[in-house]
Image (cartoon, rainbow, N blue to C red):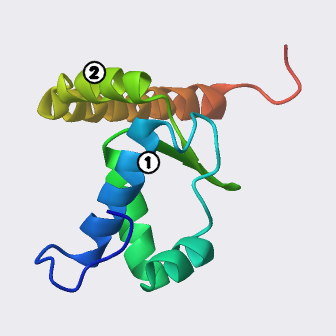
C-alpha cells in the first residue's frame, strides 16, 4: 500500500502514517533519514499539509520519527519500541504531583530569597 485510498474508512492521516510506518519498518526509510517535508508528503499522498502534520504526529507518538526545526527524521525501529515501552511505564499522575510539589518549593525559596535581599545592607559585605 503506497497510496491513500478513498475506500479505506480510516482517516487519511492514519493511512499516511501507516504507509510511512511500513517504509520505516521495512528499512525503505533508514534511521536518521529525512522522512520528507510536509509539502512533499502532501503532494505525494495528495492530501493537505494539516493531514500530513497529523500523520507525522502519530509517528512521533509511536516513537518512529523525531521532529526538529529542520524536519522529521526516521528513528531506529528498535529504539522506537524501547522508547515507547519506557514512555508507557511513566506514571503521569505521580509526575504531575511531583511537579506541583517542586513548583511550591521554588515559590517558597523565591520568597525567602526576596526576604533576604530586602534585609541586606546596601554597600555592606
Is 120 located above or below residue 103 in the figure? Answer: above
| Left or right: where 89 falls relative to 33 | left
Mark on residue 23?
A: 1
Q: Position of residue 123 (x, y in %)?
A: 89, 26
Q: Position of residue 82 (x, y in %)?
A: 33, 20
| Left or right: where 11 falls relative to 13 | left
Is 46 located above or below residue 34 in the figure? Answer: below
Q: Position of residue 118 (x, y in %)?
A: 62, 34
Res 101 → quadrant: top left
What's the CA distance linking mark 2 and mark 1?
24 Å
Res 100 → quadrant: top left
Identity of the residue drawn at 53% across and 31% down: 115
Decide which of 93, 99 is in the foreground and name it. Answer: 93
Residue 60 makes an appearance in the image: no
Label whose residue precedes the other's in the sequence (2 or 1): 1
Decide which of 106, 111 is in the foreground and name it. Answer: 106
Residue 86 makes an appearance in the image: yes
Secondary structure under tag 2 reads helix
Number of the front mark, 2 or 1: 1
Secondary structure under tag 1 reads helix
Instruction: Indicate the quadrant containing the C terminus: top left, top right, bottom left or bottom right.
Output: top right
| Left or right: where 74 falls relative to 99 | right
Instruction: Indicate the quadrant containing the N terminus: top left, top right, bottom left or bottom right.
Output: bottom left
Q: Position of residue 105 (x, y in %)?
A: 36, 26
Is 40 located above or below residue 73 in the figure? Answer: below
For label 1, count other residues whose C-alpha is less than 10 Å away and answer few (under 14), some (14-19) or many (20+): some
Q: Which residue is mark 2?
A: 86
Amino acid at each position: 500500500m503506497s497510496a491513500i485510498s478513498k475506500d479505506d474508512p480510516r482517516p487519511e492521516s492514519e493511512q499516511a502514517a501507516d504507509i510511512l510506518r511500513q517504509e520505516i519498518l521495512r528499512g525503505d526509510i533508514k534511521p536518521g533519514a529525512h522522512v520528507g517535508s510536509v509539502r512533499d508528503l502532501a503532494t505525494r499522498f495528495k492530501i493537505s499539509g494539516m493531514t500530513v502534520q497529523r500523520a507525522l504526529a502519530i509517528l512521533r507518538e509511536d516513537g518512529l520519527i523525531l521532529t526538529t526545526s529542520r524536519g522529521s527524521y526516521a528513528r531506529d525501529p528498535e529504539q522506537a519500541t524501547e522508547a515507547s515501552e519506557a514512555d508507557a511505564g511513566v506514571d503521569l499522575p505521580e509526575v504531575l504531583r511531583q511537579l506541583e510539589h517542586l513548583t511550591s518549593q521554588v515559590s517558597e525559596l523565591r520568597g525567602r530569597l526576596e526576604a533576604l535581599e530586602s534585609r541586606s545592607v546596601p554597600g555592606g559585605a
